[in-house]
Image: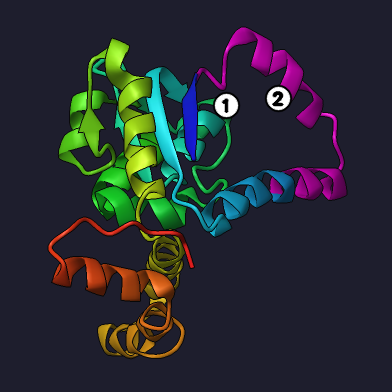
Amino acid sequence: MVTGAGGNFCSGGDVHEIIGPLTRMAMPELLAFTRMTGDLVKARRHCPQPVIAAVDGVCAGAGAIMAMASDIRFATPAAKTAFLFTRVGLAGADMGACAILPRIIGQGRAADLLFSGRSMSADEGERWGFFNRIVAPEELLADAQAYAAMLAAGPTFAHGITKNQLEMEWAMPVETAVEAEAQAQAQAICMRTKDFERAYHAFAAKRKPVFEGD
């Protein structure tokens, strides 16, 4: 799955269309809104297919969160990513940012972005591990789609297991994670798939395996 990310969350239009109504809501309505936006991140993280973000230009606020919540992130040199909630008087603790961003770029760098609301350049994002690849603007979508096609041609069931374990093992000690990967939750299931058997026979025949996701 490839998703585009860009657009300024705090443009003039968004201030009036999104932030304005929030100032007039009671607490129950505000909680419903923040839970709704959080559900968007949960859906992206729980999607069994890897999600690839293609970022060009300004990617701020909720757009930055959507890029953060993706599994793979491509960007152009013009990408500027900002978690700018603090600039409108809100906490950086929004839509899972305080949990996910430090795991991607480190606690200190995440703290800098979430406290200051400043933009992270494409170069910073690549050096810090936020962006997997920087590409020319004219190649961005094609490269992201080619990467998605490569994943889709692979063992898709196993990719789903990998994504699930990447999510689950964040909070696990290494010993527990190793055991979880050995048990039926992860690798043992993959060893019972036809894709695993196909890959073995292809390797033995010195040819490229054709995966079917079962």
Q: Which residue is mark 2?
A: 19
- Dot 1 or dot 2: first in sequence order is 2
Residue at image point 72% right, 51% down: 35
Q: Position of residue 140 (x, y in %)?
A: 32, 21
Which mark's residue is nearer the viewer, 1 or 2?
A: 2
Q: Which residue is mark 1?
A: 88
Secondary structure category for the residue under label 2: helix
Q: Position of residue 163 (x, y in %)?
A: 42, 62
Q: Amino acid at mark 1?
A: Val
| Label 1 environment density (alpha carbons within 10 Å; few <14, some 14–19, many ≥20) | few
- Check if residue 8 falls in the magenta segment: yes
Q: Is residue 94 above or below residue 188?
A: above
Quadrant in the picture for residue 62:
top right
Residue at image point 67% right, 43% down: 37
Give the number of the disc on residue 9: none
Q: Is residue 61 visible?
A: no
Say whether marks 1 and 2 touch (CB < 8 Å): yes
199 to the left or right of 148: left
**Count of numbered tags:** 2
C-alpha gap between disc 1 and disc 2: 9 Å
Bounds of the magenta segment: 7-34
